[in-house]
Amino acid sequence: MAPACQRIDTPPPTRPSTVLRIGAPEYNFGDVDVGLQQIARILSLESLTTLGTDGRALPSLADRWNWAADGLALRLHIRSGIQTHTGRHVNAELIAQALTEAVTRPSNLALYWSLADVSSIEATGGDELVVSLRRRSGALPEDLDIPLAFGPNSDGTGPYKVVKNEATEVVMERFDSYYGGRPTILQVVAKPYPTLRTAWTSLLRGEIDLVTNVSPDALQFVRSDSIRVTSHLRRYQYLVAFNSTRPPFVSPIVRRALNLAVDRTQLVSRSLDGHGVPATGPLWPRHWAYDATIQPFMFDSRSAETLLESAGFPIARGITSSGQRQVRFTFTCLLPANFSTLERMALELQRQLYDIGVDMKFDAIPADEYSKRVREGRFEAVLIDMISGPTFGRPYIFWRSAKGFRGLNVFGYENVEAERLFDVLRESTNEGAIRSAAKRLQRVFLEDPPAMFLVWNERTRAISRQFTVTEETDRDPLYTLWRWTASQPPSATAQ
């Protein structure tokens, strides 16, 4: 760490400002929000719709859509003037082929809650497409933000086309015929870095131009006259998910008590240097139907202790034979090894829980083993960075009935009312009904929380001032990279 924290006085190497080099740290873990393939998808592939910060579907390849009277078909109009990277004209027939492949892919069926309801996809004209459903699924426009690839070579329509895609490097070149306008940056090169430290050290040395993720503790070393940092609230939150099939987490009273024991404001301050927003449930708080008037979990250690007493977990007075304080119960929490942010958060959380007599121990294991054990449900609790927004479909895939349809619910959570309300949110196109169901679902998760919901976290990008960044409020700047410009006059090779 010490050499990395020193100021770098050596002038950075001179390179064409129309080539952007990206460093993606901690690429070997399952956080697709920062991996090489995610960067490639953002820049090369597009979808029929895109999602606003409030969870609403917005136009993308489809510029408008409307429901049939019976709610069992969605008609979409395809934007004109779009070409694929290989020069094919994008029409409804080509979209229908790509979308059919996407909605039948098992991984997409697990991640998008309305796709199982699709019965057929048909091009009804050069620029019109009809998606028919087996049953009403009002969430379909939101789920049409699936990235579409055309043909076996994953031909895309985005502002950049992938010309090299390997584990050690992804190279993308600008797509001159992009319908939104020709990008200024000629080429984007993304490489993996095993740690955050090595990535931002390379940024300081001028070897790369952008680091996809800078931890809060590194910001003071990265900020400079030549580097800007930009942060946005991610649709992910840190949480401790319980295995609800194992004691003591079978009891909703225990799960509720542990949520009351967490001082989230202090957790954000001490673990993330203030870069995050307290979370108290699985639903995205900026969703248009979220009811902000409902009182969330507040830090109340006294009430937490009272609930644990009522659940049969008293605390004995005095100390143990080994000289330690008596505790109500002990549990083990999995976390991936060598992830500094998660480790700091785990230590702060351990301290807070110990104050109410609960001993949280850690099992820090390699990332691949961690992922395997989580998938297989081999844990008591797990500290995890989980996607939970911006739509209600995201928490649905983790917290719907594990008995009726396990899917990604490896946590054993069961709540009949939550399942019913999720179904209302998935099926309805009526905004009043959606608001009502969302409000009731918020209350269900307060009474019967499946996890300790901790912090909605921020993603901080560090970018060389060699580039002028186009920023949009609350949006990841990678999505506007095609509109960035070089701060210096471009080289002759870019002409």
Image: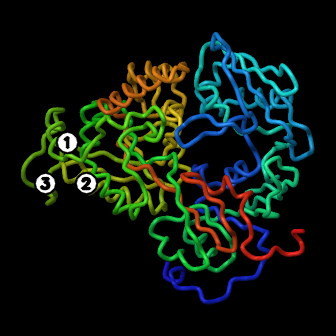
The furthest residue to the bottom: 9
Kindly tell me whether residue 371 is visible in this rendering: yes
Horizontally, residue 413 falls left or right of residue 394, namely left
Task: Report if the CB atoms under discs 2 and 1 are less than 8 Å apart.
Answer: no
Q: Reading the chain from its start, which is encountered first: label 2 or label 3?
A: 3
Secondary structure state at the residue bearing disc 1 = helix
Q: Reading the chain from its start, which is encountered first: label 2 or label 1?
A: 1
Residue at x 42%, y 28% (from the top left corner):
438
Name the mark nearer the viewer: 2 or 3. Answer: 2
Q: Position of residue 151 (x, y in %)?
A: 86, 37
Q: Position of residue 437 (x, y in %)?
A: 42, 23
Kindly tell me whether residue 402 is visible in this rendering: no
Name the mark nearer the viewer: 1 or 3. Answer: 1
- Residue at numbered disc 3: 320
Crowd tier of the residue under label 1, counting other residues whose Cα lies within 10 Å: few below 14, some 14–19, many 20 or above: many
Viewer-proximal residue among 58 and 109: 58
- Indicate which disc residue 352 carries: 2
Query: Gap between marks 2 and 1, in whole Å?
Result: 12 Å
Q: Position of residue 318 (x, y in %)?
A: 7, 53
Amino acid at circle 1: Ala
Residue at x 46%, y 39% (from the top left corner):
284
Viewer-proximal residue among 348 and 54: 54
- Indicate which disc residue 304 carries: 1
Query: Gap between marks 1 and 3, in whole Å?
Result: 23 Å
Q: Position of residue 220 (x, y in %)?
A: 47, 75
Secondary structure state at the residue bearing disc 2 = helix
Horizontally, residue 4 falls left or right of residue 446, namely right
Q: Reading the chain from its start, which is encountered first: label 1 or label 3?
A: 1
